[in-house]
Image (tube, rainbow, N blue to C red):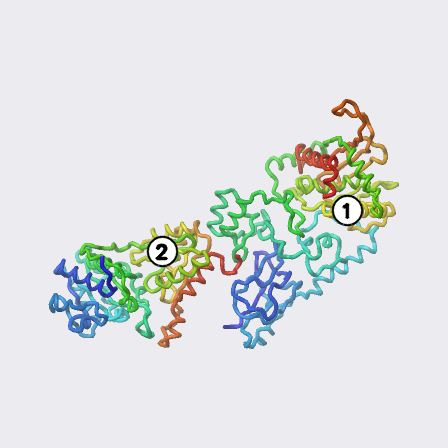
Amino acid sequence: MAVMTYREALNLALREEMARDDRVFVIGEEVGLYEGAYKVTQGLLKEFGPRRIVDTPIAESGFTGVGIGAAMVGLRPVVEMMTFNFAMLALDQIVNSAAKMNYMSGGQFNVPIVIRGPGGPAHQLAAQHSQSMEVYFYHVPGLKVVRPSTPEDAKGLLKSAIRDDNPVIFIESETLYAIKGEVSEDPEFLIPLGKAAVRRVGTDVTVVAYMGMMYRALEAAEELAKDGISIEIVDPRTLQPLDSATILESVRKTHRAVVVEAGAGFAGMGSELTAVITEQAFDDLDAPVERVTGVPAPMPYARNLEKAKTPSKERIIEAVRKVCYANGNGGR
Amino acid sequence: MAVSKVLMPKLSEAMESGKIIKWLKKEGDRIQAGDILAEVETDKADVEMEAFGAGVLRKILSPAGSTVPVGSLIGVIAEPDEDIAAVASQAGGAPATPAAAAAPAAAAAPEMASRPAAVPPQPRREDPAARTPSPSTGPTAPARVAAAPPAAPATALRPAAAASPAPGDGGRLKASPLARKIAAQSGVDLHVVHGSGPGGRIVRRDVEAASAAPAARPVAVPVAPGVEFEDRPLSQIRAAIAKRMPLSKAPVPHFYVSSEVAMDRGWSLREELNALEGQPKISFNDLVLRACALALLQHPGVNASFQGESIRVFYRAHIGIAVALEDGLITPVLRDVHAKSLGQIATEARDLAERARQRKLRAPEMSGATFSISNLGMFDVTEFSAIINPPEGAILAVGSVRTIPVVTADGLGVGRRMMLTLSCDHRVMDGAMGARFLQDVKRLLEEPLRLLV
């Protein structure tokens, strides 16, 4: 084990997988000479050379298409989006080619591609660069969607994504690149896709949250603990496929659930989580599932408004109290 | 913050209007979403009304006591600097004024008092809603309302069944899925569980509290003021008995239990009490009244009335006292006997009996008994059986106190004895229930200091 940043953990995953399998290559804007807009590919050009670390023009649709084609003929490309917001330019390639190729070719072609880069709200990146992009992808059959919250997850899940034979959307976060954590240096350390993690064990309320929201939930847990409310935090890690078993197991224990997402709530991840919990753990619920979501508005640039749009620790606490009937609404 | 309207909520399917019992917040109070703003009386229950908006309760448009249609604007929540004139002016929806609501009640009282002879006794099946104490009814209101303590806090009116639909009325019972599951597992009847969640939703903690305290049934426990009875569903056996018994002795199938009571100590106590200066004279019947009232609280099954589909169990002891008249019999009702001292009972019972003989009783004083006592002791009657006065479930026949030879530990002695015979409605109770009640009455009379504590 070593303590490293989330960025270093991603870098290590790429290095290990490129060393392990020479079919793996990285393609994207500024990934080579500039060593990545967020320095995730630092040192890789020097180590693996320009045939495996490929700089491209600013042309997301083009280089994503190149990646998909390469994957179809047997390579294992890792396509970097400078930010995932730019993946919208490659949406047709991802949705209509990567996701459907295996199905439409009758199984003749898999597309073992990883498309990775940062997404979600960060620090004053404004309306076009702060979007929670996972919602555009987990709806599409044929895509796997990963959102790793910790350095260890970043490494273990990226390695699993590269080894997976399906297209994997792997969305990191600008706000997490610098966080540090213990990471296994074992080159065979993998975290399977579709397996959630219980970040904090509790008894009263299950809070499902990932990425920055998971950290807000941890802060909320500390505060709620002072009032004697114990929350259990489940981080799905992979949104598609979703580890509903772990979430349901927790809800069946606590009987109450709060789901948190940074993006706007309508038809968001929280909606899906709420549906899963309500459909499968209905008789175990003592309160309706509460959603904490971003405000449905474009992300403002102003720092105070950005803060107001994004779910806060306070709003998570409020939701937890509500499902505990500890909000003054009929309880206590 | 937007201006938020406080509307009369629709709290049940059938609810068309609601009466504001009282506001728990006043104008100027700061309100959080979820705060309880007011208590509302609906056709079914008294319900706490939650605030949905946050801000300051700027305006109360419908005062306590008013009855307003569902959806009417009854208040406005807004920030202090917000202009609420436009919203407040939307008040309307023709809510009944408190004056209008209170007027019939106030008008009814003198009318009843002015023509006592012509007014038939009030039907004793009282409408639960009518018995709910309300701030708009003062001491001049009809007796059936005045029977409740006028100052009864409405918050206390939320026991068990109050917040839930009565059995069989088709009302939707709100409970969390988990609460339903736990209730099914632990055998808790959700209809008698008070829901503490939003809108009265029954949640886990409510079921757990209910199953942890199953003995929180009415027996002997001081019941919230204002709650006079509960309707308990008939058991199978009870329903069968209820069907068959009237066939043997229509219309009320009587049975009788008798017991001899040693009145030696009661005799001495009475002599001592009556020797006190300035105290009202206590009769044997007053001792029996007090003993019965206390025992009735312990045995609500005897303080009960057959209602066809259910048995109405009363929480308060209103005792009818049979008074012989020249040409018949009248039974004035002494109310809340359980809450009265022997002195009070003596004074009030004498007053009732005297006015009964003078035919000066008011109509309300002749109805509403939950139990009756008939005493023929003054006629040297040893024992007799009385006929139940429907819809009461039982009546106690009291004989004279006789001085007779009794067997004591030392041999033969002289004792004072009194026969009690309880007539019971078999549709309401069985022999053992009546016997246990009588046993307690006997014990209270044989250890008469219990009547004083």
x%, y% of residue B91? Answer: 61, 71
Indicate the amino acid at tag 2. Arg
Q: Is residue B252 visible?
A: no
**Observer-nearest residue: A232 or A294?**
A232
**In the image, which is nearer the foreground, mark 1 or mark 2?**
2
The picture quadrant where one finds residue A113 is bottom left
Please provide percent x and percent y for residue B426. 68, 35
Give residue B416's quadrant in the image. Answer: top right
- Is residue B265 shown above or below B113? above
Q: Which residue is mark 1?
A: B334
Which residue corresponds to the image point at 48% horizontal and 46% vertical from the top-left? B182
Q: CA distance from mark 1 to mark 2?
A: 64 Å
Q: Which residue: 57% across, 56% down? A: B12
Above or below for B30 versus A231: below
Which chain is home to disc 2? A
Q: Residue B33, can we see it?
A: yes
As drawn, is B145 to the left or to the right of A278? right
